[in-house]
Amino acid sequence: MPSPTATLYRATVLHTPDSPFLKADALQVQSDGGLLVESGVIRASGSYGDVRAAWPDATVTDLRGGLLLPGFIDTHVHYPQVRVIGGLGLPLLDWLGQCALPEEVRLSGDSYARGVARDFLGGLISAGTTTALVFGAHFQGAMHAFFEEAARRGLRAVSGLVVSDRLLRDELHTTPQRAYDEGKALIERWHGVGRALYAVTPRFSLSASEGILDACGALMREFPDVRFTSHINENGREIEVVRELFPSARDYLDTYERAGLVGRRSVLAHNVHPSDRELGVMADHRCTAAHCPCSNSALGSGFFPLRRHLDAGVPVSLGSDVGGGTGFSLLKEGLQAHFMQNLMGAEGVALSPAHLLYLATRAGAQALDLQDLTGDFSVGRQFDAVHLQPAPGTTLDTVFRHADSPERALAAAFATGTPADVARVWIGGDEVHRRG
Ligand SMILES: O=c1[nH]c(=O)c2nc[nH]c2[nH]1
Ligand SMILES: [Zn+2]
């Protein structure tokens, strides 16, 4: 029998429990759908009429007039960089030196870091993101502030201390021993607490000695269920420097592989310029590439070879890469991915709205090994959801009212939707955002 707290959400519901890269008709649509949620978990789904008949006592929340989608999952986004979005026109290493790193130094102050964490979480959640693999800060105090604020907002946050010991700025450098000690303390404090998970996070091999990478490997061996994230193969000059710094490594991936950092719970951002060997190893380990199309465009990093990833069997998810990226909206990332694949001609992959929704939701859950928890609306998943409902009189509102199918409305949401079109957001059944 339903408990008195059961809520029946009535909406146009779309989700992708299966991958459209592997299965035709992967997009599941209910024009007048019902999702029955109890204690934050989806207990039943189907047409509104059927679910209503089975659960006549549930309280109905009427969300008709927009689209109800699984909450977005951003698999690469930097918390310390929210205030420096928009440093356009610089390649990666110049952008880091001039825009990102000076700001990241300021997070050595705990109260500054807390303010940044609040700005970051406000932007992320109001864009419809409910789970994120968040590149952290270089300071332990800033990471406590982040996890505390993320818990207060209810985000599913996977994050960790960023560690480096060369070629950035002295203030951002640590030592292998300190990286290990501080990482261990943060894991013991936060991993698995509430909705938080820990990710071991060397910044990139350019700024990490073998000693730092080995310290990361030691943490991964000691705590096998934490996640791993870093950057890879983003920019030509970066790749050259890594080759010079690791002369005995077979390639960029090998610098991580040798330290035991490539696995099922590893997510490597960018991978714009991979070798076939690297793709083969990533596929063997089920290690995900987080594709960040706005960042790749803004920093001129290049065109992501999606076709080669798919052919090799490498899982791919989406990231906003704020602040190299241009904002928190995974709708915008989906659109930019679509544009870039179009511009690649025969080498590109034609991305349908179903592909974009999958990349923005279910693919991210799989990347983080959270596919049993979130990413789609199957029975048993947490109710992590975003209600897109444009304000009356906006362009997207016009298109929604004239769309001849939910699929067309979904395409329009990716083409022209923004965070202003996000009306409500839920995580684990808790409403975490409502447009003012
Ligand atoms: O896009 C990026 N943003 C960063 O902050 C960064 N650090 C290393 N490599 C990076 N790439
Ligand atoms: Zn990044």
Image (tube, rainbow, N blue to C red):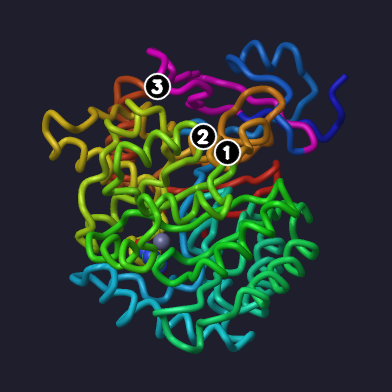
Point out which mark residue 264 bears: 1
Q: Which residues are magenta?
A: 10-39
Residue 420 in sight in this render: no
For mark 3, does the 10 Å Cα neighbourhood hold few (<14), some (14 to 19), or many (20 or more) residues? Answer: many
Left-right relation of 401 to 378: left
For mark 1, does the 10 Å Cα neighbourhood hold few (<14), some (14 to 19), or many (20 or more) residues? Answer: many
Q: Label 1 sits on what residue type? A: Arg
Q: Secondary structure at mark 1?
A: loop
Residue found farthest to the front: 248
Foreground pick, 330 / 205 = 205
- Residue that label 2 marks: 286
Foreground pick, 111 / 274 = 274
The residue depicted at 39 percent of the width and 45 percent of the height is 390
**Residue 224 x/y as whole percent:** 71, 47
Q: Secondary structure at mark 3?
A: loop
Left-right relation of 244 to 172: left
Quadrant of the rendered image containing residue 368: top right
What is the spatial separation of the Cα atoms under label 3 and label 2, in whole angstroms?
18 Å
Foreground pick, 55 / 110 = 110
First in residue order: circle 3 vs circle 2: 3
The residue depicted at 56 percent of the width and 35 percent of the height is 375
Q: Nearer the viewer, mark 3 or mark 2?
A: 2
Do the CB atoms of the residues marked 1 and 2 lie less than 8 Å apart?
yes
Q: Label 2 sits on what residue type? A: Arg
